[in-house]
Amino acid sequence: MPTIDSNGCPINVEVEGAEGAPVLMLSNSLGTDLHMWDKQMPAFTKTFRVVRYDRRGHGKSGAPKGPYSVEMLGHDALAIMDALKLTKVNWCGLSMGGMVGMWLGANAPERIGRLVLSNTAAEMRAPEIWNGRIATVRKSGMDAIVEGTIERWFTQGFRERPGSQADLDPVRDMIRTTPAEGYIGCCEAIRDMDQSESIRKITAPTLIIAGEHDPSTTVASAKFIQERIKGSTITPLNAAHISNIEQPQAYTEAVLKHLG
């Protein structure tokens, strides 16, 4: 699959699905790679030409030293679209992928058809949390945050369910193998982001998915976004933060229903 240059940073991209089908672009959470969408791919590729990618600083993409910004990450997404000659895409982003989706919807509205923003927030009001996480990774590496991240990302019931390690271990590996500089750069982007007013410019039909047990990007965060995007709707799921893995069927059905 292609490696696409975005302002000197190589971005790893995979494209699957029928040529000529409408395009759905997927964007991951912080600390994961494009494989976080594996459970959705069989259903999504039946209808869509699916473009998924490793964000700058993650997976097989480049990890230049930060700081990064949501604007920079939005331009990375536009560079992918331009390289693949995609005039307009539908966008589904989870967590940080949703933050990038908000930036695109507000700043490049002509490139976005329908928009799915899941488990995300327009701003994160606790810089001390992000600074603490950055300090931990700088001192002790990515291993130091793996289990704490898993506890935040998935409910206790899901983590303790028989067979759940088959879902959790690949996520642990994604976090562990994320380049520290890339993770830190993206943490800085989230820490410094404030899209609370700019999202009022979004006109794309928008679905907001919220995890009812998400401690990071809460249902209140989803309602905040809904109040500012005219005509947007919320679908709650019985999940914590990575709702597409914890509730794959319900997540997939919600996205496909919205995309029509």
Image (spheres, rainbow, N blue to C red):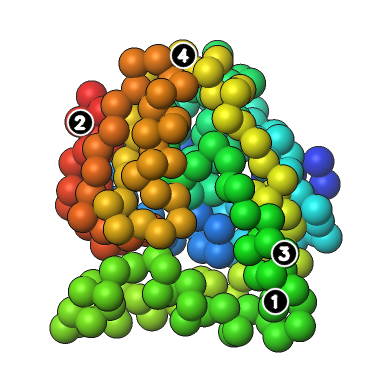
Classify residue 70 as left or right of residue 13: right
Picture disc at residue 257: 2
Q: CA distance from mark 1 to mark 3?
A: 10 Å
Identity, as a three-letter code, of the amino acid under mark 2: Lys
Callout 3: SS = helix
1 vs 3, front mark = 3
Residue 140 image point, x, y percent: 71, 85
| Earlier sequence position, callout 2 versus callout 4 | 4
Above/below status of 110 relative to 164:
above
Identity, as a three-letter code, of the amino acid under mark 4: Thr
Callout 1: SS = helix
Residue behind mark 4: 203
Above/below status of 84 relative to 215:
above
Identity, as a three-letter code, of the amino acid under mark 3: Asn
Local packing at callout 1 (Cα closer than 10 Å; few below 14, some 14-19, many 20+) is some
4 vs 3, front mark = 3
* Res 199 quadrant in image: top right
